[in-house]
């Protein structure tokens, strides 16, 4: 359990630094994770472009989520909320 907590802390830290480079503060990163969860919670097939489109409709500007950020968010959702995610890479 301690190892999972440390992993989640590391992932959250990485996500914060990644998104702070895009101008987001801690409260905005928290809100972004919640908004991404709202988009994904009912399941389905999603692309980074689709997630950004949905975030835009929720008031976010620009392409805030990239492949690295979504991987970090999905790891947090999996570790902390046992959210099951299957990912597929398309070339």
Image (spheres, rainbow, N blue to C red):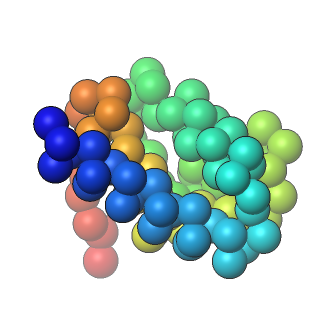
Give the position of the N terminus as an image quadrant.
top left
Q: How many numbered badges does the structure rendering display?
A: 0
Residue 39 visible within the image: no
* Percent x, y of residue 52: 65, 54
Residue at 75% across, 62% down: 24
Q: Position of residue 16 (x, y in %)?
A: 57, 62
- Farthest residue in the top direction? 42
As drawn, 64 above or below 87: below
Q: Is residue 37 above or below residue 62?
A: above
- Residue 57's quadrant in the figure? top right
Which x, y percent locates residue 80? 33, 33
Q: Write down the quadrant of residue 54 in the picture.
A: top right
Q: Nearer the viewer, residue 90 or 29?
A: 29
At horizontal 27% and vertical 52% (from top left) the residue drawn is 6
Extreme residue in the front direction: 2
Q: Viewed as shown, does residue 12 lie left or right of 90?
A: right
Please state which of residues 70 and 11 is positioned toward the viewer in this rendering: 11
**Residue placed at 37% from the left, 38% from the top?**
77
In this image, 69 relative to 21: left or right?
A: left
Is 17 placed left or right of 59 in the picture? left
- Residue 69 location, x and y as percent? 49, 63
Which of the 4 image quadrants contains residue 21?
Answer: bottom right
Answer with left or right where residue 22 lies relative to residue 67: right
What residue sits 29% from the left and 77% below the top?
91
């Amino acid at each position: 359990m301690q190892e999972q907590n440390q992993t989640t802390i590391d992932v959250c830290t990485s996500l914060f630094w990644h998104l702070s480079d895009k101008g987001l503060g801690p409260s905005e990163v928290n809100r972004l994770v919640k908004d991404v969860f709202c988009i994904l919670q009912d399941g389905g097939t999603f692309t980074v472009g689709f997630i950004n489109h949905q975030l835009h409709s929720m008031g976010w500007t620009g392409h805030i989520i990239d492949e690295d950020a979504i991987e970090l968010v999905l790891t947090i959702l999996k570790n902390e909320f046992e959210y099951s995610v299957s990912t597929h890479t398309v070339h």
